Image (cartoon, helix red, strand yellow):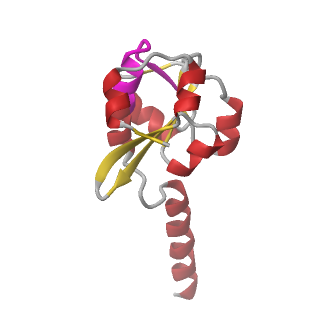
Amino acid sequence: MKLKAAVLILMLGSFSAWLPAGDLPPEVAAKLIKIIATASGGTVSCRDSGMKAALEAAGVTVDSNSRVVWATNPVEIKMLKGRLIIVGRKEFLSAGASIAIVEDAGKPKIYLNQGSVTASGVAMSDAIYKLGEKQ
């Protein structure tokens, strides 16, 4: 019985590392990413399999050459510098991400790193600037 409990605890811990508290479900984030990417051709680069599936289900074309990318960690953000980098954690803005899409009080919230957005050279809808909170 103790072995089963230990395995369950390890499994739950690994799931929480994959989807930390406060992250939006991939399906919700994918819809917002689609809106952001529409102004720049509608394609997104994504290496995360869960988000890739959510993006494709939302009608987004996943293309590794896209100027708009979904990143999941600071190393990936550093490698993708110069693109419009969208992340699911606000603290990644300080690592160079352009846009963070997070859950705040049960609702989606968009944060912008204006310097990174400008450096990407990707055109975005004015609505994103109005909705997003600049950091």
Q: Is residue 2 left or right of residue 109?
A: right
Q: Position of residue 16 (x, y in %)?
A: 50, 62
Count how many numbered circles sit on residues in the image: 0
Relative to residue 1, is residue 126 depicted above or below? above
Could one spot residue 84 in this view of the protein?
A: yes
Q: Position of residue 128 (x, y in %)?
A: 35, 29
Q: Is residue 76 left or right of residue 45?
A: right
In this view, which residue lies farthest toward the top? 41
Q: Position of residue 46 (x, y in %)?
A: 54, 30
Q: Is residue 109 left or right of residue 75?
A: left
Could one spot residue 57 in this view of the protein?
A: no
User: Which range is magenta?
Assistant: 33-46
Residue at figure coordinates x 53%, y 36% from the top left: 113
42 is within the stretch colored magenta: yes
Q: Position of residue 51 (x, y in %)?
A: 46, 38
Residue at figure coordinates x 38%, y 29% from the top left: 129
Relative to residue 38, is residue 86 depicted above or below? below
In which image quadrant can residue 125 be found? top left
Residue at figure coordinates x 51%, y 49% from the top left: 89
In-front residue for pair 101/119? 119
In which image quadrant can residue 93 be found? top right
In which image quadrant can residue 10 be found? bottom right
Relative to residue 57, is residue 38 depicted above or below? above
In-front residue for pair 77/17? 77
Residue at figure coordinates x 32%, y 46% from the top left: 108
In-front residue for pair 124/29? 124
85 is within the stretch colored magenta: no
